[in-house]
Image: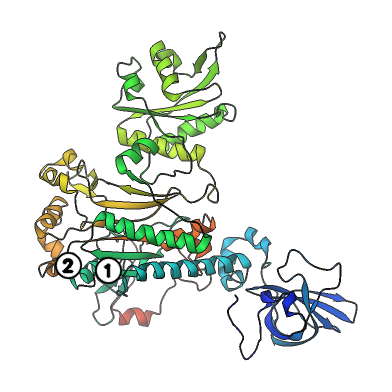
Amino acid sequence: MNPDTSTHLRTVQCGHLRADNVGETVILCGWVAKRREHGDHLAFIDLRDHTGIIQCVVDGAADLRSEYVVRVTGVVRHRPEGTVNDHLDTGEVEVGDCSVEILASAEAPPFPLDERAADVDENIRLRYRYLDIRRPEMQRNLRTRAKVNTAIRQAMNSQGFVEIETPMLIASTPEGARDFVVPARSRPGSFYALPQSPQLFKQLCMVGGIDRYYQLARCFRDEDLRADRQFEFTQLDAEMSFASQADVIEAITKVIGHVVDSLTGEKLGEVPQIAWREAMDRYGSDKPDIRFGMELVELTDVFADTGFNAFKASSIKGLRHSGGSDVTTRSRLDDLTNTAKRWGAKGLVWMRVEAGEDGSVTLNSPVAKFLSDTEKSDLITRFDAQVGDILYLVADDWLSVCHVLGLLRLALGRPPVNEGGLHFLWVVDFPLFESVDPENGRPVPAHHPFTMPNEDDWDLLDGTGQELLQVRSQAYDLVLNGWELGSGSVRIHRSDIQSRILELLGIGEEEAHEKFGFLLDAFRYGAPPHAGFAFGVDRVVALLLGEENIREVIAFPKTQSGSDPLTGAPSTIDPAHLNELGLRLSPLTD
Ligand code: ASP
């Protein structure tokens, strides 16, 4: 059922007319998508609004141009035989005997508002975003986004979550990225920060007894932009009291399930979980794209006693590109090797799998002569190598090997964004620390500093350096088709553990107090155990629509360089305004 969108100016919308409406007098409002004159006596207008296009027939010449805004009154009738248009939902009918009132004239648009717009420079589309939004694709994207928001709210409300708005002007939060700051006029020299996430406020809501909080939160991070990242983005942000990791995973899985069901009618079912270590081992990534196989093959034991120096490493793994030999030229192999080096590899060994003279399987590679016969035959068995395959090997420490082969796997096998369906995955058991800073020996947190370590690993917190890298956290990520949708964790609500973590991170009492003393204070007044999560709405919508670029699902995005061609932001401000804020511009120094 179409909603009743009649107003004092119109009775019905363009795309809603069908054969059932024949005989009705209708008043339509919209934009002229196209117009054709048939001699002096007849003009055909394709009238467009967001619901679709309807053909209107006007007696006499109509002085109209493309994108004029008009109000048309006429009678719905069957199209004459032979003129039915199967490409239009309204194609069986037209509106005849039309009288046309011009509501607004229009200049010629700077680019065609149809499928040809896809080839128009993105800066031009963004400069005239209001015209770009008239196109059916943008209408579909923005309306899908609204449906996703509605489905999220329904699923959260039905699980007892309360929608709460947290402030936009806050003190800096320790989320790791650079803050956007806003100078405070009332206190010259002081600044607000825009929230990187409502992290601390949602935890305070738990101390406040809200029990289950959520928000479609706008977040701001001053980071380098990419196709899948904007300075400002929206995330479903949630927090639950008296809840474990399993509870959060269950609640968020329900939300995702409801979103997918509402949009596609498909039932999501169980979302698989994989431990971080296994994800790295098998896919070389903490956000595996499981739409395709091509898993990493463990080879360290094959070369345990090797005489080949390049393979004397703590870890060796490989990838089999099935049938890849024919499609991979020598220059492509050189390119891949250089790319792998850029990713941090010491080198990339490749081997073509070929048929030997006696029908056996042989390996053709510049390094084959350095390998023993046993190593070669073990390799063939381990890879299940078939003639026509190409094998890639990397030797280094475990993490570097996984990292390089994980990227190579994507480069060789990843399907286009709109293929292969939706494959959600929970990645669990992340390490608490991602590395140790070689300069000061301090661990670098993988998530934010309020993430609870795995209870089984608490003892390891007394260790140092590399030992600390063994500590698992109670943090978890949701991944869709190789994109990290979001992350969350069980929080530390005990002050002894929090103090130890802050001490390990080198955040002294004074600094902790200055940055988030209010949270630590709040915890002194009875903090329930709590856990939460946040996922990016822009990314979910983009993936549901098969769009690679999240700007396609944002009404008014910034360009890759962070500017807005429509409004001119960022822009300079009036010197008087600067003065009022107590600010003076000085040349940038390094
Ligand atoms: N605040 C975190 C983020 O924005 C999510 C969470 O831990 O709830 O990534």
Q: Secondary structure at mark 1?
A: strand
Q: What residue would you read off at disc 2?
A: 519
Q: Position of residue 25 (x, y in %)?
A: 74, 87
Residue in the image at 49% along x and 56% along y:
543
Q: Earlier in the sequence, mark 2 or mark 1?
A: 1
Query: Viewer-proximal residue, 190 or 302?
Result: 302
- Residue indicated by mark 1: 212
Residue drawn at 42 percent across, 53 percent down: 269
In the rendered view, tell whether residue 4 sits above or below residue 89: below
Q: Which image quadrant for residue 238?
A: bottom left
Q: Give the foreground label among 2 and 1.
A: 1
Left or right for 83, reference 580: right
Q: 587 or 358, which lies in front? A: 358
Check disc 1 and give the amino acid type. Answer: Arg
Q: CA distance from mark 2 to mark 1?
A: 18 Å
Residue 590 at x, y = what percent? 32, 56
Above or below for 484 versus 13 = above
Q: Quadrant of ligand 1?
A: bottom left
Is ligand 1 closer than 8 angstroms to the Cβ of mark 1?
Answer: no
Percent from the top left, x then y, of residue 299? 36, 25
